[in-house]
Image (cartoon, rainbow, N blue to C red):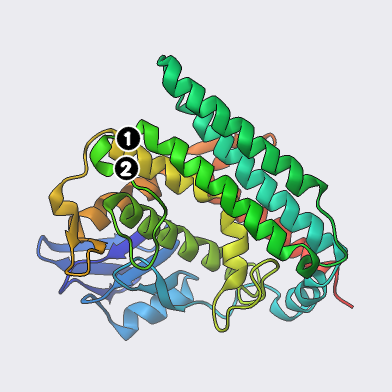
Amino acid sequence: MELVLNSYGASLSRDNEGFVIVNQDGKQRIPTEGIRSIQISRGAQITSDAVMLAVEKEIEVVFTDKGGNVIGRIWSPKYGSVSTIRKGQLNFTFSHEAVNWIKNTITKKMENQQALLLMMKTDDPATDKIIGKSISKINDYRNKVSALDGEVVSDIAATLRGWEGQASKIYFNALNTFIPQEYRFEQRSQRPAMDVANALLNYGYGILYGKIEGALIKVGIDPYVGVLHRDDYNRPVLVYDVIELYRVWVDYVVYTLLAQNVVSDAYYEVREDGSYWLEGLGRRVLIQSVNDYLEETVTIKGVTRSRYNQMFLYVQELAQTFKKYEI
């Protein structure tokens, strides 16, 4: 479970071995059992006693901006065998195995995109034709990525980014056919979003970024040492690599909300520069929708867990892979 304080004036304090949330709806006491993280947005408050209880219980405290992006976090010093795993992580990034890992990551992302498009097939022959062509084109890029090789990731990085970008463009163009006309967009826009669909996607990815970064830290991996994304200073670039496996989860949630016509003008604001930003209601609905989806139980490789726990198991396996490269 995740505690989210994203309304102005909300506060979180400690009450013995539990937390107390105070907001415009009143006061609520919540026990620490089952809480994985606490998310604090601008305008909300948390006391030092509550922070210390969170650290004691190994509950991460995350601070986010209005776009849902993590701008700081507090975590327990008990997380992970940091030095052992991080030494191996650095060696791994310059190995040929890193080439195979990032290729597998990108091909899996494309496979997930194809699977989501297949889920959304309709009885309309024209639409099905568009989807079929899109899946076929993405498959071409999957095959290209699989055949790509180099000694280290930098040998294939530029080509890999280009093919990944082309496949994603095809994918989003196809997904657009399933949502109401007023929500369709010509291209992905980030920082800022230029339409409501991209505002939802960006905020949803921000939620997922935070969860993946937290999982990496908990198992002792350094999120600032990336594999494909290695050039951005002071950013958790490994998160940008790992999230490629799970972006489709946010895509599904966002496109479901749009297709169901539940998004209203109260969900977002449009600023003078034409950019779109989620308001409190939109953020609450999206956060709850993403969290509910991550808590659903699924079976992957014979293991039945919630989607969040499946992701965490993957990160644990990644930590063990890095550990093997320690010298």
Where on the picture, by quarter, is residue 269? bottom left
Total numbered labels placed on residues in the image: 2
Query: SS at mark 1?
Result: loop
Q: Secondary structure at mark 2?
A: loop
User: Residue beneath label 2, please?
Assistant: 184
Quadrant of residue 312 in the image? bottom right
Which label number is shown at residue 11?
Answer: none
- Work out whether residue 66 can be spotted: yes
Q: Which residue lies under the disc numbered 1?
A: 179
- Identify the residue shown where x is 40% and y is 16%: 124
Q: Earlier in the sequence, mark 1 or mark 2?
A: 1
Q: Position of residue 262 (x, y in %)?
A: 21, 39
At a point 58% along the width and 32% down the height, the residue shown is: 135
Tell me the distance, in whole angstroms, between the alpha carbons under discs 1 and 2: 7 Å
- Name the amino acid, label 2: Arg
Query: Which one is in front, 110 or 216?
Result: 110
Q: Is residue 107 left or right of residue 206?
A: right
Number of the front mark, 1 or 2: 2
Q: Quadrant of the N terminus?
A: bottom left
Image location of residue 133, percent across then percent down: 56, 28
Is label 1 in contact with label 2 (beta carbons under 8 Å)? yes
- Nearest to the observer: residue 24 or residue 105: 105
Residue 304, visible in the rendered structure: no
Say which residue appears at 84% left-offset and 56% top-offset: 149
In the rendered image of this protein, does residue 265 appear above or below residue 176? Answer: below
Q: Position of residue 320 (x, y in %)?
A: 77, 62
Image quarter of residue 33 = bottom left
Q: Nearer the viewer, residue 250 or 26?
A: 250
- Above or below, 254 relative to 81: above
Type of residue at label 1?
Answer: Ile
